[in-house]
Every structure is written in structure tokens, then in C-alpha cells.
Amino acid sequence: MVTNTASAGERSPAAGPVVVGMFEPGSEEWHAARRSGIGGSEIAAVLGISPYESAFSLWHRKQGLIAPVAESEEMYWGKVHEPGICRRFAELHPEHSLTVAPTYAAAARRWQIANPDRLWGPDLLEAKTARTAEGWGEPGTDEIPVHYRAQCLQYLDVLGRRRCWVAVLIAGSEYREYVVEYDAAEAALLRDAGAGFMASLADGTRPDIDGHTSTYQAIKELPDGLDDIDIEIAAELRDEYFAALDAAKDADTEKRRLAGLVLDEIGTGHRAVVDGRTVATRTVHDGHTHSLQPARNRSAA
């Protein structure tokens, strides 16, 4: 169980970060170094903005109550492509050399952990892969998925640096670069949220159950065994559960109807767009529609 309850504190670049060690990402040593703190890829879960992890599931992982996240295909291929993405960045930016970074912790907040992919002169570099360009804005800007922005800001905060470059390989062949500048106000929000999460680990107060997929998976994983007994639950919870099932059935029917209308409009096309922005993408197998994939960023603006 984690017991480190250090306060959020202030950014202290003069103190410098503490080098925890050099670990292979995903290794047992890497996981062990992160158990007593919050890594850059985890702070988004604490904030409730991660597509992969919820605060609830992360909390239970940190307590050792459920297993570490298993490596997905997306994670595997991200590691495979990382050296090539970094090599391309180095070719385009020879003014500094790239250095593989160790695992760091903030000197004043040992729970705040940073694992930047590379150090590049005074800056940091993160290498990413993406299946589509959804969520990635104009190259050269800071318009990247919000969970990656949180990761960059935590790394900058821990290392006392000002700029994090993000090089992304989209759909296996489109290379782009983005730049995230340190923002003191945002970094303070991350520190406060992280400190609060660490305090909740220490006092055993788990986060609320939300609708995140990883929350549901964590709840499924927590019980061990099966007792042939009845458990009385509140009538209000029963009613809300049944109402949600009915609403989901109605929503699923309406979703199929609207997906049919979109597909009918697309015809033999590839994508449905509004004002140039992708709404949904049609995939084809053996000449016929295989699926309709909605855009990840579904804002109407």
C-alpha cells in the first residue's frame, strides 16, 4: 500500500529532479518504480481525462488489489515505433543530440514521476503513434489529445524544463510534430490533483465509481470466488439500473438507425464530413461495408 502523502508543493527547478533509475518501459522494475507514485501517463487518469484508465482502476492498481495494465497491441506497437520516430526527429533537428531518459521523481514530491522518451538539449521529446489524425490539430501547435498534454506538463514540471516536443506517426506513414510549453497554472492543477490522489491512497478512500470501461473491469476483477448467497441492494439502485438498461436499448436502436442514415449518405465514399471535419469513416471488406467508425473528437464546432 502506498503511504507517501507529500504535499503538492511548488515547482523547484533549482533543486533538480531525482534520478530513480534507468528501466525498460513495461518491465517489472519499471512498474516497481511507479507503484509509490504517479507517472506521466497516469496523471490523466487521476484527472479523469484518460481514455485508457480511470481514477478508480488506477487507485486499485496502486493498492495492489488488481493486476497492472496488460500490454495492449497499441502499447506494443508504440514501443516498436518509438526509436524510428525519435530517429526521424533527430534527422530533422540536428542542432541537439537525443538522449534516452531515465526515470525521474520531483525532488520535493517523490510521488510525481516522469519518464520522458528522450532529452533533447534543454527540451523533452515524446514519441507517439496514432491510428488516425483525430484529436491532433495543426502541426507545430500544441493541439494534441488532452491526456498527452497532461503527460507533457507533468514531465516539464518534474524536470524544470520549458518545452516538450511531441512527434507522432499517424496511420503508420504520416509524421507530425507539436510543441507543448510549460504552463504554471495547469501544472499546479496537476500537482494538486496528484497530491489529493496520493492522500486518498494513504487514507483508503477510493474514488467514486464512474462509467469508464476500466472502472467496470476493475470492479469485475476485485471479487475472488463465488458465494451462493443473496445480497440485498437498495430499491433505488435497482430502479436506476433497470432504467439504464432500457435507455441503453433505446439508444442502441437509435444509434443503428442514424448509422444507417450516415452510411446511406456516404454510399461508396470513405468518410462523412461536415465543413471538412470527419464525422465518421467507412471501412470496407471484400467490397462491402465492414463498419462505420465515428470520429474520436465529436464536438459539433
Image (tube, rainbow, N blue to C red):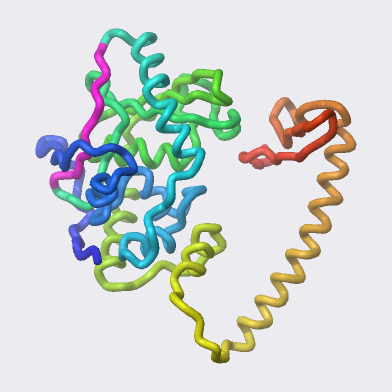
| In this view, 202 is above or below 11 | below
In the image, the segment drawn in magenta is 96-107
Residue 142 falls in image quadrant: top left
Residue 171, percent across and down?
A: 58, 25
The quadrant the C terminus occupies is top right
Direction from residue 260 to residue 272 in the image, left or right: left
Q: Please give the name of the residue rendered at 53% of the width and 64% of the height, measured from the top-left corner.
A: 216
Residue 101 falls in image quadrant: top left
* Number of numbered discs visible in the structure rendering: 0
Q: Nearer the viewer, residue 208 or 74?
A: 74
The quadrant the N terminus occupies is bottom left
Q: Please give the name of the residue rendered at 18% of the width and 50% of the height, measured from the top-left corner.
A: 110
| In this view, 214 is above or below 107 | below
Q: Nearer the viewer, residue 144 or 169?
A: 169
Residue 242, percent across and down?
A: 71, 77
Residue 299, percent across and down?
A: 65, 41
Residue sitting at the far left: 15
Residue 77, percent across and down?
A: 47, 32
Q: Nearer the viewer, residue 221 or 2?
A: 221
